[in-house]
Structures are given as structure tokens and as C-alpha cells.
Image (spheres, grey):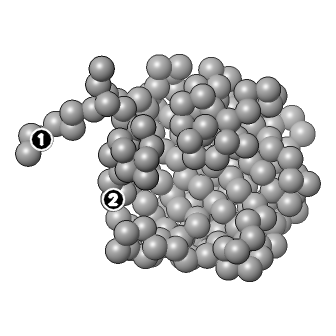
Amino acid sequence: MPPVDPNEVLMTGENSFIRLSPDGGTTLSDRASHWRVLWCPAGAGHTLFLQSTLTEGRVRVYSDNIGVARWLQKTIESLLFPAFADTALPVLGARFERQGGPWSTATETVTAAEARIALSWYDCIEPFVLNAPPGFNNRPIGVFSTFFPARSAQLELNGRIATASPWPEMRGDRQGSSACLAWSETWVKPRG
């Protein structure tokens, strides 16, 4: 096997996420997809896609680079969660900051004109590398990422905290969670 992946690189960075449920995953109440893009064809930047009980179920998009947000919507979020891929949604300007990490608590803070959002992951279990090349689960593009599954996570908007919880879920033979720090993430597509 050659040491170089044969695919074309689409994006590299991070895509940590929090999905919360009041009933162990049967009903999804809150969903946050946080992107730290180190490189993609639209540049670098951060984007948060959010749909929550705290937003009355409405989707909100926050970013410090509108081009990156729109590129993510058209290229990746359209496959992951179509509600986040709606390019008619306004992109709200925001600042992004991270503190901590999977050894204690990792918190991503997003500050916009009308909102302060904090996403926190803690009580992480053993990390693993997700290897989903193009064609996996019938997706035309693939992803390689280091997952740090969190047993616990918190989503906060302007001082209000979502009441639901993450749930355990398997990724192949590894124990995962519906709330993961997904670092060292690279998306690829077949050449040609």
C-alpha cells in the first residue's frame, strides 16, 4: 500500500460536534457543528452551524469567513445535515476562541452581536481515528479524523443551557458519542 492517499484534499482542520437528546438518541433536540478550517479552497476560518431548543429550532450560522461557511454548506454539510446547507440562511459575523482540551474540558466560545455561545466537551474516553474514504456510506467524498468522544457535553446560548444530553454510539468497533471533538480532520474527494 503506498504511503500517500490517492485522493484530492478538499479541506483540513476540525469539525467538532454536539448532538443532544432528551431520550438517549431517539429524539434529537439540539445539534451544533463547529468547524475550524485551516485550509480549503475558500480560505481559512471558523463556522458554527446551530439548531437547538435554545434557538426555538431555527438554524443559525455564525462565521468569521462567509466564503468558508458557504463552501462548507455546498461541499460537506449538504451531505452531513441538509438543514445546515441552506445558503439562503444569513451568516452572522462572530469571533471564535478555544480553551482546554480532551484531557479536561474543551470549550469553544462563539461571540456575535446578539449571541454568546459556549460549546463544551468533557469526560472524554479513548480517542480513535475515523477512516471513511470516498464511497463509505455511499458518500462521494471521504474523511479522516481523530475523534475524542465525550461522555458529557454542554451547549449554552446567552446564559441559557440546553437540558438534553449526548448519548453513546458505536463507530465501527469503537465506543463513540454523539458529542465528539473531531480534530486533525481532512476531507478528500477522488481525483479526476
Q: In this view, does 1 lie to the left or right of 18?
A: left
Q: Work out whether residue 174 or residue 152 is closer to the camera in this orientation and state it.
A: 174
Residue depicted at 91% across the width and 54% down the height: 56
Residue furthest to the left in view is 1
What is the total number of numbered labels drawn onto the structure image? 2
Q: Residue beneath label 1, please?
A: 3
In this view, 40 is above or below 97: above
| Residue 43 drawn at (x, y percent) | 51, 21
If the image is split into quadrants, where does the N terminus sit? top left
Q: Kindly report the distance in space between the C-alpha atoms of the residues bearing marks 1 and 2.
A: 17 Å
Q: Residues within 10 Å of mark 2 (few under 14, many from 20)?
A: some
Amino acid type at circle 2 is Val
Q: How crowded is mark 1: few (under 14 residues within 10 Å), some or many (20 or more)?
A: few
Q: Work out whether residue 101 or residue 167 is closer to the camera in this orientation and state it.
A: 167
Residue depicted at 63% across the width and 32% down the height: 73
| Residue 120 drawn at (x, y percent) | 65, 62
Q: Work out whether residue 179 or residue 5 is closer to the camera in this orientation and state it.
A: 5
Q: In this view, does 70 lie to the left or right of 38?
A: right
If the image is split into quadrants, where does the C terminus sit? top left
| Residue 31 drawn at (x, y percent) | 71, 56
Q: Residue beneath label 2, please?
A: 129
* Mark closest to the chain's N terminus, 1 or 2: 1
Residue depicted at 58% across the width and 46% down the height: 80
Residue depicted at 43% across the width and 60% down the height: 147
Q: Is residue 35 left or right of residue 186?
A: right
Q: Specify the quadrant of the image occupied by residue 11.
A: top left
Numbered disc 2: secondary structure: strand
In this view, 44 is above or below 105: above
In this view, 149 is above or below 34: below
Asked if disc 1 and disc 2 are in contact, CB closer than 8 Å, the reply is no
Amino acid type at circle 1 is Pro
For the question of whether residue 63 can be seen, the reply is yes
